[in-house]
Amino acid sequence: MKHFTQKIRRERVWYALALLFVILLGIASRQFPYIFPIVLGKYPGDALWTIAVYLLCCIILPKTPSYKIAGIALLISFLDEISQLYQAPWINEIRRTYPGHVILGSGFSMADLVAYTVGTALAYIAEQGAFFLRSRGGYR
């Protein structure tokens, strides 16, 4: 499969705007869970969390191919989830704060790993689609 990131560079400002949008949507998904189908539960927020990680990686590593960004984002997301198995008092105090809970989570869940995988795949597919359209003159 051809990776369009090799021909088109990432414009950080657009990724930063997308990151801001995803963060706001992720917060909204927890504050107003009815914006997504109820059957999805909390998992849209988890998928959005890993999409935010993907976008942040794109900002930090703008010349890195998308498939590597996807791997890095998924690794970070999985490590964050696995870290929730560690329940020491000092880190649990951090997790009790709103930013700590959003960033570190609170309890390990295998289902979250599925949501992270879906989120990473969606971010990768969306970016590849955008690069494809841009390479064809579909948007500027």
Image (cartoon, grey):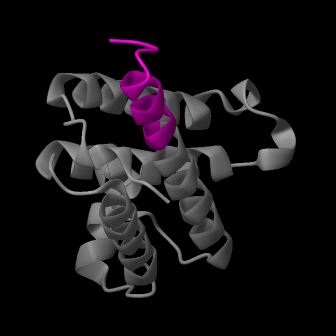
Magenta: main secondary structure: helix
Question: Foreground residue, 121 or 94?
Answer: 121
Estimate the x, y position of residue 136 in percent, counting from the top left: 44, 23
Name the quadrant containing residue 29: top right
For the point 38% across and 52% down, the residue is: 3
| Residue visible at 46% across and 14% down in the picture | 138
Work out whether 74 lies above or below 100.
below
Question: In this rendering, would 121 be left or right of 17?
Answer: right
- Say above or below: 40 vs 135: below
Tell me what residue is drawn at x 37 percent, y 74 percent.
75
Q: Position of residue 137 (x, y in %)?
A: 40, 15
- Circle count: 0
Seen in the image, is 27 located left or right of residue 60?
Answer: right
Residue 69 vs 9, above or below: the answer is: below
Question: Can you give x and y, in whole percent of width and height, for residue 18 in the image?
Answer: 35, 27
- Does the rendering let one see residue 122? yes
User: What is the magenta range?
Assistant: 127-140
5 horizontally vs 9: left or right: right
Residue 108 placement: quadrant: bottom right
Between 46 and 62, the residue placed more toward the observer is: 62
Residue 96 visible in the snapshot: no
Report x, y in % for residue 50. 44, 54
Left or right: 64 as drawn, with respect to 66: left
The C terminus sits in image quarter: top left
